[in-house]
C-alpha cells in the first residue's frame, strides 16, 4: 500500500490550552508556531504516524507579562527547551470517526506517554485541487508530570494555578505530492 505524507496547513490549524486560575476560572492560551508531519498507509489514518513540534516561544495568553513568565524557567524555560514535542505510538479507531491517539509527549526535557481523543472530520479537496484532512484533538495532562510545578498557595486555601491542563487542537493537513 502506498505511503502518503501529509503536511500541516498552518493557516487552518490551531493548538490551545486552558488551566484553572485561582481555582475559580480558567485562563486560555495558544501556540502560534508549530509543525506537524503525518504519514499514512493509503488514505487510512488508523495506522498513521504523527510528529508534532510546538515552539514554546510562540505561547500567547493575551497577556505579555504572563507569556514572559510562562517562557521563563518557572514554566517552559524556552531558552533551554525551545520546543514541546509529540511522537505518536498509535492511532486507534474507537468509533466511526473517533480515535484514541497515544504517544510520547516531551515538555521541558521530560517525556511521558499521553492519551488524547481525536475526531476525524474527513477529507475534502479544496478549490485548488489540494486534498485536505481535518481532526479535532482534545485531552488533558498534568503539568506537574512534566516538571511544571511553579505555583503559589492562596491565603484561603488552594493554589494559584491548577495542575490539569486541558488541550484542544483543530488541525488540518494537506496531502503532499508523492
Image: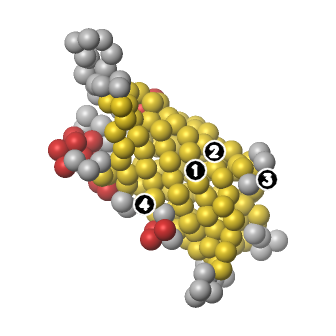
Q: Is 160 left or right of 135, judged from the image as shown? A: left
When asked about the image quadrant of residue 2, the answer is bottom right
What residue is disc 3 on?
96
Q: Residue 72's image quarter?
A: top left
**Residue at horizontal 72%, vertical 50%?**
98
Q: Which mark is residue 137?
A: 1
Residue 16 seen in render = yes
Q: Is residue 132 above or below residue 68?
A: below
Tag 2 residue: 117
Q: Residues within 10 Å of mark 3 (few under 14, many from 20)?
A: few
Identify the residue at horizontal 69%, vertical 65% (top origin).
Answer: 122
Task: Indicate the quadrant where residue 113 lies.
Answer: top right
Q: Earlier in the sequence, mark 1 or mark 3?
A: 3
**In front of the other: 73 or 133:** 133
Question: Extreme right residue here?
Answer: 1
Name the residue furthest bottom. 128
Q: Earlier in the sequence, mark 3 or mark 2?
A: 3
Density class for disc 4 (Cα within 10 Å; few <14, some 14-19, many ≥20) is some
Q: Nearer the viewer, mark 4 or mark 1?
A: 1
Give the Cα separation between the discs numbered 4 and 1.
Answer: 15 Å
How far is the residue under mark 4 from the one under mark 3?
28 Å
**Alpha carbon of mark 2 to alpha carbon of mark 4: how far?**
19 Å
Sequence-wise, the earlier of marks 2 and 4 is 4
Sequence order check, earlier mark of 4 and 1: 4
User: Marks 1 and 3, how far apart in space?
Assistant: 15 Å
Number of the front mark, 2 or 4? 2
Amino acid at each position: 500500500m502506498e505511503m502518503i505524507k501529509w503536511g500541516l496547513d498552518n493557516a487552518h490549524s490551531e493548538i490551545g490550552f486552558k488551566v484553572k486560575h485561582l481555582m475559580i476560572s480558567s485562563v486560555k492560551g495558544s501556540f502560534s508556531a508549530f509543525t506537524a508531519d503525518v504519514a499514512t498507509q493509503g488514505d487510512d489514518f488508523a495506522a498513521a504516524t504523527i510528529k508534532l513540534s510546538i515552539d514554546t516561544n510562540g505561547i500567547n495568553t493575551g497577556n505579555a507579562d504572563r507569556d514572559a513568565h510562562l517562557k521563563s524557567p518557572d514554566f517552559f524555560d524556552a531558552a533551554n527547551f525551545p520546543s514541546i514535542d509529540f511522537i505518536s505510538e498509535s492511532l486507534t479507531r474507537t468509533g466511526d470517526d473517533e480515535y484514541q491517539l497515544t504517544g510520547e509527549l516531551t515538555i521541558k526535557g521530560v517525556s511521558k506517554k499521553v492519551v488524547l481523543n481525536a475526531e476525524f472530520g474527513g477529507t475534502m479537496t479544496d478549490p485548488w485541487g489540494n486534498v485536505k484532512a481535518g481532526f479535532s484533538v482534545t485531552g488533558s495532562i498534568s503539568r506537574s508530570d512534566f516538571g511544571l510545578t511553579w505555583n503559589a498557595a492562596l491565603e484561603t486555601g488552594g493554589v494559584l494555578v491548577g495542575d490539569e491542563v486541558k488541550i484542544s487542537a483543530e488541525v488540518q493537513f494537506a496531502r503532499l505530492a508523492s
